[in-house]
Amino acid sequence: MGTTRKVIVIGSGPAGHTAAIYAARANLAPLMLTGVQPGGQLMLTTLVENYPGFVEGIQGPELMETMKRQAEHFGTEMIAEDVTAVDFSRRPFVVQAGDATWEGHTIIIATGATAKLLGLPAETKLMGRGISTCATCDGFFFKDQNIMVVGGGDSAMEEALYLSRLGKKVDVVHRRDTLRASKIMQERAFKNPKIEFVWDSAVDDVMDVEKGKVTAVRLRNLKTGTALGPSGRRRLHSDRPRAEHPDLPRPDRAPAERLHQGEARDDRDERAGRLRGGRRPGPRLPPGGDGRGDGLHGCARGRAVPRSDPAALGTDTAA
């Protein structure tokens, strides 16, 4: 195991880098396990306009690269490995990533959240073949074609606005008759001549698994129950919300509760007088990013299925 670390940071988004910078400046020599795809969800974001200090905004990947350099400047050691197991039942705590194992007096979990899909059987089979988890990653493949976005939050509007620069037309399908997105994002989407809205509707199915590509989307009006497809709108960007949480303003993100489930308790749970798992609580861990209590979370943003022939899209293009 080697030398026991004072601080180990799991995750490499803004929260993880912030924790690493503070720990490094306190001479705690932090170790950051960044994961094999470091940088968090901002790596999949284009222009970031609401981060202080950048009057005209900054590109997400550029911002994360700046944070990385700052953390390294103060002495953070970074290892590009995904954490596969943790043990918080003993002290020092134990973290395992790949073939290596580390002990640490303090573990900061800043692993963010992961995209939540629509739950349709065809999604996994057509992932990377017309269904994708990243419009900014795969939008180029659907240039000058029709695109469909599903959802009504900020992520859906951001992706629709981005895709409108590439596609001929963007249809936004939302299960309500009003959007959940912030006012400024709504105004931008409504003013965009390439974006149209399909209200009170949900996606029932995505075709065609047998052909190995997306050929159509079947919609259903939630108020009348009327089937609206197959629509011939041949891609889908999905932004289906999870259960809303007051601390998560973008409810299209879902914690990926896996590795430290049952191993730790969240400070917010204790304040609410609520313990998870029906067992004696583990050590208190500070949550970071979009982390919520019992979860080691992956980093990915919304869901996409632009709607042209995705033959050029290999399965390795899904973010």
Image (cartoon, rainbow, N blue to C red):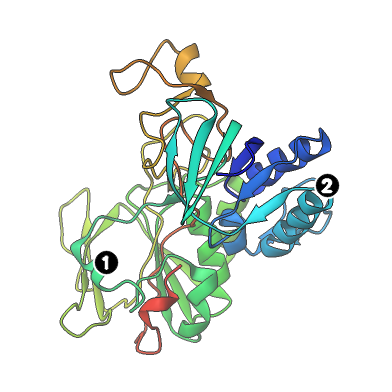
Residue 4 coordinates in the image, percent (x, y):
62, 36
Disc ID at residue 142: none
| Residue 93 visible, this angle | yes
In the picture, residue 104 is in which quadrant? top right
Q: Quadrant of the N terminus?
A: top right
| Of the image marks 1 and 2, the number of the one nearer the N terminus | 2
Residue 287 coordinates in the image, percent (x, y):
55, 32
Front-most of residues 263 and 188 = 263
Residue hosting label 2: 74
Give SS at disc 1.
helix
- At horizontal 39% and vertical 14% (from top left) the residue drawn is 274
Q: Is residue 319 left or right of residue 27?
A: left
- Circle 1 crowding by C-alpha within 10 Å: few under 14, some 14–19, many from 20: some
Disc ID at residue 124: 1
Q: Is residue 18 left or right of residue 199?
A: right
| Residue 190 visible, this angle | no
For the residues labelled 1 and 2, the Cα–Cα distance comes to 42 Å
- At horizontal 21% and vertical 75% (from top left) the residue drawn is 207
Q: Is residue 152 above or below residue 106?
A: below
Give SS at disc 2.
loop
In this view, the mark in front (1 or 2): 2
Residue 127 coordinates in the image, percent (x, y):
32, 71
In the picture, residue 34 is in which quadrant? bottom right
- Circle 2 crowding by C-alpha within 10 Å: few under 14, some 14–19, many from 20: some
Front-most of residues 199 and 91 = 91
Name the residue type under label 1.
Thr
Name the residue type under label 2.
Phe
- At horizontal 62% and vertical 40% (from top left) the residue drawn is 8
Count of numbered tags? 2
